[in-house]
Image (tube, rainbow, N blue to C red):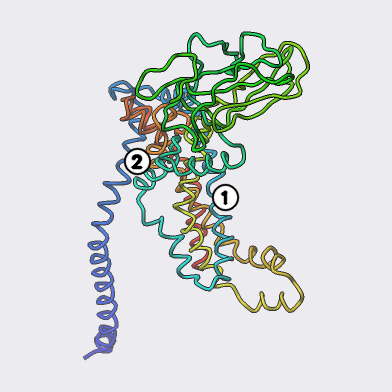
Amino acid sequence: MTATTLVHKEASPPAAGATRRRRTRRRGRIVALLFVFPALLLLGALVVYPVLFSVGRSFFDASGTRFVGGGNYTEMFRDPATVKAIRNTAIWVVVAPALLTGLGLILAVLVEKVRWATAFKLLLFMPMAVSFLAAGIIFRLAYDEDPDKGVLNAAVVSVHDAFAGTSSYPTARARDGQDLTRGRDGSYLTATALSPGDSVALGLVGVLPKDLPQGASPAAAAPHRAAPGELRGVVYLDFTPGGGGRPGKVDPKESGLPGMKVEATRDGRTVASTTTAGDGSFRFTGLDDGSYAVKLPAANFAPPYQGVSWLGPALVTPAIIGAYLWIWTGFAMVLIGAGLAALPRDALEAARMDGANEWQIFRRITVPLLAPVLTVVFVTLVINVMKVFDLVYIIAPGPVQEDATVLATQMWLVSFGGGNNQGLGSALGVLLLLLVIPAMVVNVRRFRRSQR
């Protein structure tokens, strides 16, 4: 056996080992590819293909047969509804993530001081378990303008009426043929001049007996003559239950209207005012000689305060953002709370020993150390609000849908909600994708940095 043969025999075992390792790695790659292939297939079918198809479709007209180039993108920025959607989306991106990050930070810090912190976090996080559809229905009812249905307006009306009061007779009006003329402001004024010593009966209709105040009693008969220097009268419901009675006359079964404000005016100026008693009677004393008119101010007949139009054109976007805050505040609080729990406690304790108060610790130590977490939360919420659709579509009523629309809802409305222009809708989808990509890149880089 020659020396060359011996060298080849000694070198063969390492070469065989390298070959086996290459085969093992190749087999591992094939197995890994087999496991990844279903996910890649789904990713391509559900993400890559729709994106590419939308980009291509955006260059064709509504029918999809005629190539229009950048015409859809030009039309997109000419359409007032689309411009409003872009403006509303910008409001969402600026307001909602900032508020949520701030609320989450404040609540995460405060929860640490609460004894039942876990239960408190659970309560705040529970809205995340509610679908956007259900949350939209809940807040659509809560924002209802009718105080008997909308809980927010019921609270607003209760507070308003507690401080400003409310009219007891919003439906009352003068009976035809009465000596009362209605002013432009809704008040009533006697047409006949009155003098001290006179009396007057002012009959009103339009008030249901069941709506009378609790202190109402049978109307007092108007005196034929008042005392010198005195002007007297009665304000009553000129309606006899069960029928009968004489229009313009106080009948025994007719009720007085208590709490009605009455004024004595002279030359257009109010010289005296009073409020009717339970039987509707009133009187003015100490009047000088001359001609007067009795006035029932418009405040007696003002319609009840109905609250705030939460879903009107002016407030619909802030109202929907409020619903979004209710859902996502718990998410922000939990993420920031997790970052807060990982902070080095020795730095906080050292600051306290150096005499720093809690506000200084929060501003100079807690917030700077939490900056990476706050950035991740903020960017994640920015991506999320750009895609908001359910809340806007469900909460905003039809007449103000255009005032609340964002890019996602406008894309759906243009494509499927009556517009039937999928070319323009695809252009809106591409615009939305281009707006989301920078935020996604920032988030991915942040995650990679944290892993290092």
| Neighbours of disc 1 within 10 Å: few (<14), some (14-19), many (20+) | some
In the image, residue 300 sits, relative to residue 246, either above or below, namely: below
Q: Residue at x 66, y 15 (%)?
A: 198
> Which label sits on residue 444?
none
Location of mark 1 (residue): 98
Disc number lying in front (2 or 1): 1
- Which three-letter amino acid code belongs to the residue tagged 1? Ala
Q: Which secondary structure, mark 1?
A: helix
Residue drawn 60% across and 16% down?
Answer: 224
Position in image of residue 98 (x %, y %): 57, 50
How crowded is the residue under tag 2: few (<14 C-alpha within 10 Å), some, or many (20+)? some
Q: Furthest residue to the bottom?
A: 1
Q: Which residue is mark 2?
A: 51
Q: Which picture quadrant has residue 262?
A: top right
Mark 2 / mark 1, whichever is N-terminal: 2
Say which of 91 and 161 sits in front: 161
Question: Is the residue 85 above or below the residue 222 in the image?
Answer: below
Residue 205, image x and y in percent? 46, 20
- Looking at the image, which is closer to me, 267 or 287? 287
Residue at horizontal 35%, vertical 40%?
Answer: 51
Q: Would residue 136 appear left or right of 228 to someone viewing this image?
A: left
Quarter of the figure with residue 422 = top left
Rendered residue at 50%/8% (across/down): 177
Task: Please identify the quadrant where the N terminus is shown.
Answer: bottom left
In front of the other: 73 or 243: 243
Q: Position of residue 64 (x, y in %)?
A: 29, 25
Vertical arrangement, residue 192 with respect to residue 245, above or below: above
As measured in the structure, the alpha-carbon distance from the residue carrying label 2 to the one carrying label 1 is: 30 Å
Q: Report x, y in % for residue 79.
A: 46, 23
